[in-house]
Amino acid sequence: MLNHIPRRLVNRCARETGVDVQARRFSVRSHLAAMLFAQLSHAMGLNDVCDWFRLKQGALARIDITPPARNTLSHANRNREAEFVEKLFWSLLGELQSAHPRFATGRMGRGTLHRFKVRIHAVDSSVLQLFANCMDWAKHRRRKAAAKMHLRLDLHSFLPSFVIVGTARQHDNKRARELCAGLQAGEIVVFDKAYVDFPHLADLAERGVWWVTRAKDNMKYRVLKNLAGGGKDIVKDQMVSVKTAGGGRMRMRRVEAWVEIDGKPKLMVFITNNFQWSPRSVCELYKRRWDIEVFFKQVKQVLNLGSFLGYNANAVKWQVYAALIVYVLLRFQAYLSDWPHSFKRLFAVTRSALWERIDLLALLKSYGTASERMKVTGALNAAWLPGFAPAKT
């Protein structure tokens, strides 16, 4: 796994962020290896990581990794700038995508997205519960502490394209502009109604970015035109205008459709700035937003973001970006080996082989007897927005 992270990248990011100056006996690469191991092994705490490394110090010496003491690892997580691991994550992802263009493009033009030949992004956030409620930086509610990961996910490659790790106090729409700043004209972004901010939506439309989201229940609008219907599930397809904060008015499309939730039909309202798509396409695009929930499930439940090795802001960021690096490395292994099974099984096989001197890529190419092929680059088969499951053939 470490062979896919070039040392020159580690050294360059260490120099640029200044963490190499703080490293004496416990090198930056050893620190990185310890945090990646904590993800792959589901370590229960700092002692778990350090005990494993001491027991395996002979094997680690061959790859130039130094086992840390508990206080050493805790001090490094607290004081070595997490900007290093963040910069390393983006540098590594960029290098892998540059060297392997098919890994970068993913499912472009395939599956349910085949009608859209442009990049489709999903934007959402996930709360990371912290069990130490005495931390002022992460105070979420009266007796809770939490961090929040805001993410923009490329739905074709199923890889992150923008990440913000911060406190859970700030509302999602305050981060919307940052998350969407890198979107290009012609691309599509899908997000939940928590990110709805009319000035920002108008800015996206002016930049040529198409967006799809859900309307808030209290949205006030004026109907300008009723458009052609799109099927029995489509109740309304309208061109509407809404009042913006500056006193002006903004045009958008409003699609009202019946969806099935918990076995019962429910009326849902979608809004978009595109007037050419069919109303069914608008609903299907919003359905793809569920893929980002699958991503959060994989990162938080399959990897180790359910419990933290440290609770100060820097240590939390170290662990989040270490998890993202492991996620990208696992998906890269799946790409190289043409892995046909689920992401969860990929993680389980990799974890079982952690201390074996075998070729991981060869193992993945030859592993497994299950006949059902589950594409690891896509969403889980059961993770469909209720009412939008694909028709059985």
Image (spheres, rainbow, N blue to C red):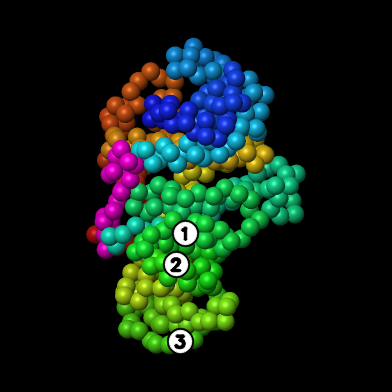
Q: CA distance from mark 3 to mark 1?
A: 28 Å
Residue occupying image coordinates x 64% and y 50%: 167
Q: Does the magenta portion include 197?
A: no
Q: Tell me which residue sits at (60%, 20%) in the image.
A: 24
Label total for image: 3
Q: Amino acid at mark 1?
A: Cys
Pointers 3 and 1 in contact (CB under 8 A)?
A: no
Q: Is residue 219 above or below residue 388?
A: below
Q: Mark 1 near mark 2, Cβ–Cβ under 8 Å?
A: yes
Check residue 223 in the rendering and tell me which mark sits there, or answer none.
3
- The image position of residue 48, as x and y in percent, is 59, 25
Q: Nearer the viewer, mark 3 or mark 1?
A: 1
* Residue in front for this viewpoint, 164 or 223: 164
Q: Which residues are magenta?
A: 97-115
Kind of residue at disc 3 = Val
Amino acid found under the numbered disc labelled 2:
Leu
